[in-house]
Image (tube, rainbow, N blue to C red):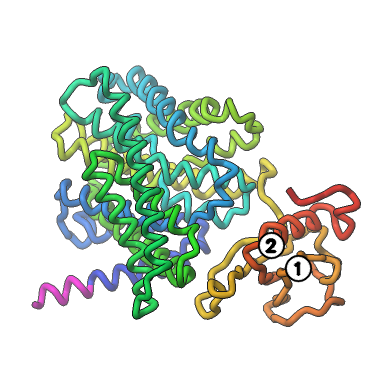
Amino acid sequence: MAELSLGLGIGALVVLIAVLAVRASVRLGLPSLLLYLGIGLLLGEAGFGILFSDAQLTQYLGIAALVVILAEGGLTTRWRNVRPALGLGIAMSTVAVAVSIGVTATGLHYLLDLEWRTALLWGAVVSSTDAAAVFSVLRGLGVHRRISGTLELESGLNDAPVYIAVVLLASPDPASWWTPALVVYELAVGAVVGIALGWIGSQALRRAALPATGLYPLATVAVCVLAYSAGQELHASGLLATYVAGLVLGNAKLPHRGDTLSFAEGLGWLAQIGLFVLLGLYASPGRLPSVIIPALITGAVLVLVARPLSVLAAALPFRVPWREQVFLSWSGLRGAVPIVLALIPVTRDFPGAQQLIDVVFVLVVVLTLVQGTTLPLVARMLGLVRRGEAQEIEVDSAPLDELGAELLQVRVPKGSKLHGVYISELRLPVGATVSLVVRDKAGFTPQPTTRVQVGDQLLIVATEEVRADAERRIRAIDRAGRYARWKGELGE
């Protein structure tokens, strides 16, 4: 009993420190995953001396956490945001993955003298972008919808093909002619399972009369986890089934949707914290200095060659502007997923697997520091940050789900032509209204004669039917001012 209380106390303390670390990471401009990894390293063999080296258990717990993260990502992804980028997102999670693996493997074969199968395995492990890293960094960035939608889809979908590639390459069995057909089967069936269970779950939850509000979020997340299990039992991609099921459920008209998304977000944070702390605990700092050079070479090949070429190959049929391609190339954030994938060769006794884990650990830390901290600057330099963009925010205390309404937040930046516009001149569609203006940390209810100022935050309540029109109108005025329509600016 004493060990149980001590373990629970340590776990609770780690979670509290990790929660506070989120605030510190925002102030310092550092991705929070680095602080979580640091907590794990502090608890591990080089810090407080907790020894943890069970690769099999770490892999199992890592995949379980990844399932929760993907479920949360699917549930919180808006279909209308990613629909314009559906084709490009799928290409980025399939074509780009294949190109990235091939190019990275070629570079590592010649630069590090790796055997071809080993080089391909390394290339596969580091080719997956991390859903947790992308979701946490991207959604507050305010980039164009096609870019954000593409990256969200890529990070949610590409874990599945990369996982399949790593399992195949780590296996001692040689590849055969039917291997590509097997990959197509696993992805196709995984998508079908996710769509089917997501639709069945949404219909059941809409018709169920559960006795407590808190049961709806539990049931929703359980459907996503069930999709993973069903996919795996059918020898298909359970990870893809999880994300697709979450995407279907998150865009259905579920009861208590706001509560469900808040619950999923909390679970997602807990999974991220647990996963990164666990990986930091598993890492052996004493071995890391010896792999710094291979890690830097791998990172340089990946970021400077493989990622740009993979983006170019995926974006070629879609005529993506070069600025967007540059941003997509720089946005391939890595996180816990490559480390979890690197555990698969260890559990299968693949030669040199331990070195791969150490290389990937260093690589993730370096790329997160370099890419994660500079992503907002790169977006601004390329002119891809959208001003006047309305962002949805969740309000648990208001029954917005029952009203069929959504709450949007608009910040008025410097240089915006919203400055000086009267509230009445916004001419929002019927069903949308500015309910609150926050100015100099003081909020007030605006009147038709209230003039918008730089630095204001506007809270707009809009019905689901007119939300998109309200967003377009705000963007149009931000770009062209009160006479936007006369100037032909429609905010598209």
Helix, strand or loop for disc 2: loop
Q: Nearer the viewer, residue 33 or 51?
A: 33
Relative to 245, 55 lies left or right: left
Q: CA distance from mark 2 to mark 1?
A: 8 Å
Image quadrant where residue 407 sits: bottom right
Image quadrant where residue 463 sits: bottom right
Determine the residue located farthest toward the front in the rendered image.
207
Q: Judge whether 22 appears above or below 363 on screen.
A: below
Helix, strand or loop for disc 1: loop
Relative to 97, 11 lies left or right: left
Determine the residue located farthest toward the left in the rendered image.
1
Residue displayed at 42% across by 49% down: 131
The amino acid at mark 1 is: Val
Tag 2 and tag 1, C-beta contact below 8 Å: yes
**Pointer 2 or 1: first along the chain:** 1
Residue displayed at 28% across by 28% down: 182
Residue 214, numbered circle: none
Q: Judge whether 231 appears above or below 181 on screen.
A: below
Image quadrant where residue 105 sits: top left
Residue displayed at 23% across by 19% down: 176
Residue 430, numbered circle: 1
Mark 1: few/some/many CA within 10 Å (<14, 14-19, 20+)? few
Q: Is residue 175 visible?
A: yes
Mark 2: few/some/many CA within 10 Å (<14, 14-19, 20+)? some
Q: Which residue is mark 2?
A: 466
Q: Nearer the viewer, residue 181 or 305?
A: 181
Q: Nearer the viewer, residue 193 or 60?
A: 193
Q: Judge whether 178 appears above or below 264 on screen.
A: above
Range drawn in magenta: 1-9
Q: Main secondary structure of the magenta part?
A: helix
